[in-house]
Amino acid sequence: MIGTLLRISLINLRRDKIAWLLSFVVPVIFFSIFAVIFGGMRGASTAKVRVAIVDEDNTDTSRRLVAALQAEPGLQTFTERPAKVTDQDAKPLPLNRELAQQMVRDGDLPVAIIIPAGLGKSFPSFDGTGPGLELLADTSDPVAPQMVAGLLQKAVMTGMPDAFMEGGLSQFEKHAGKMTPEQKKAVEAWLPKLKEAKTTKNGPGESSQAFGLVQVKTTDVLGAKKSNPTIAFYAAAVAVMFLLFTCANAGGGVMLEEVESGTLDRLLSSNLNMTQLLLGKWLWLTLVGIVSVTVMFLWGAIVFRVELFSHLIGFFVMTVLTAGAASSFGLMLGTLCKSRGQLAGISTTVILIMSAVGGSMFPRFLMPEGMRTAGLFTFNAWALDGYQKVFWRDAALWELWPQLLVLSALAVIFLVAARRLARRWEIA
Amino acid sequence: MDAGPAARLAAEVTAQMNSVLKVVQAHKRYGDVQALAGADVELRQGELLTLLGPNGAGKTTLIRAIAGRVRLDQGQITLLDQALSSRNGRARHRLGVVPQEIALYPLLTPLENLEAFGRLHGLSGPKLRDRVDWALEWTGLVERSRDIVKGFSGGMKRRLNIACGVLHSPDVVLLDEPTVGVDPQSRERIWEMLDRLKSTGASLILTTHQLDEAQSRCDRITIIDHGRTIATGTFAELVERTVGAGRLVSLTLDRIPAAAWNGLEVDEKTRTIRARFDDVAVGLPGLLQRLHDAGCRVQDVEVHGPSLQAVFLHLTGRELRE
């Protein structure tokens, strides 16, 4: 008896491609995505933090610190602002404090290290006197500033051990009295060796100890005045993912239901044509999407202090275009599939993957570079980047143009695709 | 001068003028399946025409082609003297389409469904209200007009399904299996509705499997098999052309007579003999006398009139449900 049941189940599974996909393929895809994000693929390098370095001190010490930071494998350093296509001369600009701050503000990179004037003279300062290093940070990525602060300690300790020793001895003599001539001679013989040793790289599995002796002052250039800075990101992330699910079910699903129940035939036998039908469905889904996202953000504003009311225009524009593109996507999925079962399987798979890669499940700044680039092929990434610009960077409307352009293009492309796919229902 | 041919010509011309829908040599292939292979249909003004045929004969394809939902590979459809094409939506507005499925929005009430489909057919204002009121009365759903359709019985849904297709007062109504899956009482009610609709001047074309309904309710019958029209006419005309108007008489006996009699079918297992008579009143007494003379006692007598089943069997060589 049980054997017969197993046989029936096996035959059903063999013939149900969607069940196959959800049982065996989707879990493997998800595992792979998470493995790449958190574990890294075999041979893949760890994600580097992009960091700007501004040397205002311009001494031998500061130059050595810049070199040590540039040699740090965990950092991708910039001492010049890359040329932008909008620049007339299209040449890279040497970075200064203002430019570096602007790059952080624009989201070009999450952290800038400022080596202030006078650092070399007082380095290392064990008693807290003299200027410390400054980090200008975009704390929408809470990991990068912490990581850079740690790597700074490491770079100083491993890249400039002789400077540390000299400073340490000077402090020793100041508080404990002069060393004997023999002691001084021994130290002077040891310091050059220490200087040479800093060029030796750590081998695999080795780690350098950081004592946290470098003063680092972190300045949040964006979120300092915000009441609950990261919550808007999560509101957008969750809203966009559920918007896609809603549109797939309410848009694509309803189209298929109309086909299966025969109401589509009836509708098309009236004065309505397929283009009008799709536009009507699209408009409805877009309105539902706008309301759904607005409810989410209103809840966020009331309960979690999301700064909705000070960003209403940007929010509204982003929400209209996001909902419009999601509606088109839902209709395209619906017109692509042959049954509601097929739609459920395909939409779940596609939306979960897009959400994972596009940043709805965890922020893209946590992802390796390759995955971040892959995210740009998803709907979610563009929508979330837009909301991020509105709520985090206080971007003006015109600054949203890349996101608005991509979302508008996706809305049109998906809708045109849906219209073409729907031709099979129009007339046999 | 002979008036016969002139009268026939006049009758033919009148009939042609009265034709509201004409399908000529419709062909449609889906991959390897030839759904229509030369189907011809003519619907006349104010008549109820049945398309009869087994499953897969091409009835629904033909209805869908007329409704503009299937593009013919070959053939022509003329509705009210206008050739129909997939692009000719204007003429098609004079059609009412009632699909086989219950094509309603289940979470809407009858009132809301009727209003929605009425608007989509271009009705509005007082005209829409009048037609919705008419449809609710016509379907007997006035009392339930504000209940959601989901909880309705199959028969109620069917009636509303038909009403949504005729709300815009079409000249020609296409009904695909309008009585399928409903109990006899509901079926009777649907037929009453269709009779009323016909009395308003609408011309109806419907598909059905119900031979008795086709035989008793419809003005003319078109029999379709393997995508082709194999016969069309009134029931009497079809009978005349195929099995003839004679009656089949079945007699169940206590035993089968020993000698074989010409013109009789004998079923020894059921002890039944069958004979066909053009006039039962003339033929049956003679047969009864012969049986009496042969010492056989008659236990039961049945007289069968000509049936559509027999006509179909005669035309196709098989039962309708095969």
Image: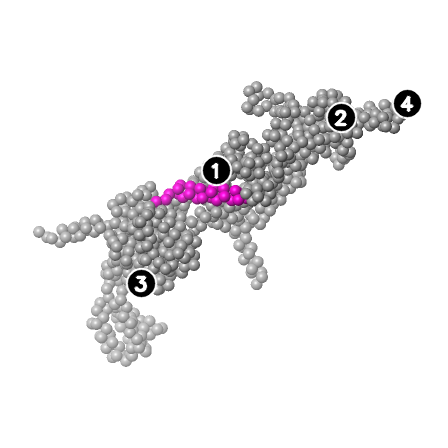
Find residue A85 and report its image quarter: top right
Name the residue at 36% across, 50% down. Answer: B115
Q: Which residues are magenta?
A: A269-296
Mark 4 vs mark 1: give the one in front. 4
Seen from the viewer's position, the closer of residues A126 and B321 is A126
- CA gap between label 4 and label 2 equals 29 Å
Name the subunit of mark 3: B
Q: Label 4 crowding class (10 Å Cα cut-off): few <14, some 14-19, many 20+?
A: few
Q: Indicate the secondary structure of the residue bearing disc 3.
A: helix
Examine the rendering and report whether any part of residue B13 can be seen: yes
Mark 1 vs mark 2: give the one in front. 2
Q: Which residue is mark 3?
A: B212
Q: Indicate the secondary structure of the residue bearing disc 4.
A: helix
The circle on residue A181 is: 4
Tell me residue B196's x, y (percent).
Answer: 28, 58
Tell me residue B73's x, y (percent).
Answer: 34, 44
Name the residue at 55% across, 23% down. Answer: A86
Name the subunit of mark 4: A
Q: Label 2 crowding class (10 Å Cα cut-off): few <14, some 14-19, many 20+?
A: some
Tell me residue A249's x, y (percent).
Answer: 49, 47
Q: Which residue is mark 2?
A: A130
Q: Earlier in the sequence, mark 4 or mark 2?
A: 2
